[in-house]
Image (cartoon, helix red, strand yellow):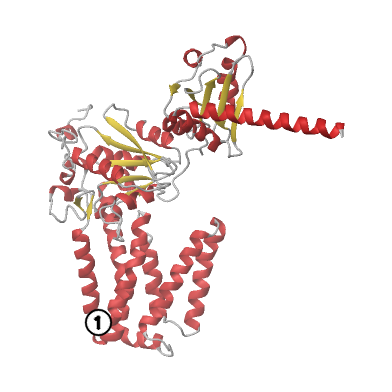
Amino acid sequence: MDGFKIHRKREKKKQNSDQQTEQKTNSQTDALTPEDRQLDEFLQLCKKSADFVSFRYSEESGYYIHYYKSMVDPDVLHRYILPYVNGEKRVGTLFGLQCVLPIDGTQVVKDVEKISEAVMSGAVLIQTKGNLKEVLTVPAVSIEKRAVSLPEVEYSVVGPKEAFVESIDANLNLVRKRLPVPELIVQELKVGRLTKTRVAIVYMDKIANEENVNTVMQRIEDFDYDKVIDSSILAQLISDNSSSPFPQMIDTERPDRVVGVLTEGKIALIVDGSPHVLTGPTPLEEFFSAFEDYYLPWHFASAFRLIRLFAVFFSVISTPLYVAVLTYHYEMIPQNLLSPLIASRSGIPFPPIIEACILELTIELLREAGARLPTKIGQTIGIVGGIVIGTAAVQAGLTSNVLLILVALAALASFTTPVYQMGNVIRLIRFPFLLFAQLWGLVGVTFCFALFIGHILKLTSLGRPYIAPVYPLRLVDLKDSLFRLPNYLQKNRPTQLRSDVSKRFNLKSHKWRDHDIED
């Protein structure tokens, strides 16, 4: 019985002690201000993550340290922070510690939102025992990035061989080293309620039109979206018409192209985490111009641009014309070509539209398989698969030799588009043309063509006409659109950009050609 009484007494003492502790904790919690509670709740939320480190450094220093170990550089932490927190270099206050830390960007803050933004950006939080309301934020982010490599999408034989990477700071460095002037302005915003992605708006002061810059800034600030993890998502959010299949901003991976458009008065958008940069305003003709054209003599550049335009037109219109002519307009086929064409289609059980759809879908399947598989396997699928499937389809009597040649040439012609986004558009718009060709023949093809022309006429890029300088007509800008004339004839920047400084250079005469040093 005595032992039982002793046990009961111990339990009562323990309950009384727990009640006193709980009352003391409640009184302390009630004494906290709303700001203190927010900070405490924020730290408790962070401690739920396994990679969040929170500890008291030592009894002597009285400092509390919090950080995400997955985002903090351990070398910075152990070399430039912890030695100044403890030992002989102990200073006792946050402001004193801030003065001795050999790291830039440290701040003593009370705002929980700023503290949250700092720690989620890779900062170390430091608190003192006597003052838990203020926090010293010390930048120590660990930056993981890949090295600058060759362009993979916009590869060129001549010109620079550098491409953007996923780091926004590295991408800004690639741009600034090519434009080492203070007129290159960079304004940074954070977009995405969850991702807090850094977006840099880059333009040339007094060259870029202020209205274009304000348009971009307003569109980025107006939309409320939870995630922006790539430049392509940002392009869809700020485009003039996001429902249009035609891209209204160029997505490029080449720093030289970005520098080129910046000097013309355009704007570049660099998104952290994306190896591609958006540029605009962008007219339609720019999607068919490779920046490699400016590294070649103007004769070759003009010829290559015209070849690309013809290739795109052929890629879109060849298969629909085949369906329209064989379905409604046999009389348009020359007599010498009519006999082999009929012979190639003899024994085929499908009408021309089904025959064309089978081959077009086969080409698209091969493209997707080649793009999604590893590089070596993808090349094998594209070459071997095309030969085997095409030959088997002809021998099985599913398609004709003539259509197989047309579809293969159309697929080859679509690859000449230098901008990948526009290449996807060319792949897509062939199918509406096929449908209209089956319904009304050449009248249907013409009607579909008129629909697309009407849609393009209404499109704008950051408020500027999409098919300029053709509409509205700007004869001066035609010098560098469908073809490219010599550089000395392009003294002015594009008029549609309304640049504050229209002249690019002054070249009064070309008499220097007749006055060499030897003369």
Q: Which amino acid does label 1 sit on?
A: Trp
Q: Which residue is drawn at 32% across and 46% down?
A: 291
Residue 47 picture quarter: top right
**Is 513 left, or right, of 383 in this rendering?**
left
- Residue 133, x across and y down, in percent: 47, 23
In the rendered image, is residue 261 in sight? no
Which part of the image, by quadrant, shows the N terminus? top right
- Residue 61, x across and y down, in percent: 60, 15
Tell me the crowding category of disc 1: few under 14, some 14 to 19, or many 20 or more residues within 10 angstroms, Cα based.
some
- In the image shown, does 381 or 131 lie closer to the viewer? 131
Q: In the rendered image of this protein, does residue 359 appear above or below residue 209?
A: below
- Residue 24, x across and y down, in percent: 58, 26
Residue 71 picture quarter: top right
Q: Residue at x 60, y 22 (%)?
A: 78
Query: Badge 1 is on which residue?
Result: 440
- In the image shown, does 164 or 57 lie closer to the viewer? 57
Q: Is mark 1 on a helix, strand or loop?
A: helix
Q: Which residue is drawn at 38% across and 60% down?
A: 415
Q: Residue at x 37, y 73 (%)?
A: 406
- In the image shown, does 391 or 499 lie closer to the viewer? 499
Q: In the rendered image of this protein, does residue 231 appear above or below residue 81?
A: below
- Residue 364, x across and y down, in percent: 44, 68
Which part of the image, by quadrant, shows the C terminus? top left
Q: In the rendered image of this protein, does residue 21 appear above or below residue 369?
A: above
**Is 507 left, or right, of 14 in this rendering?**
left
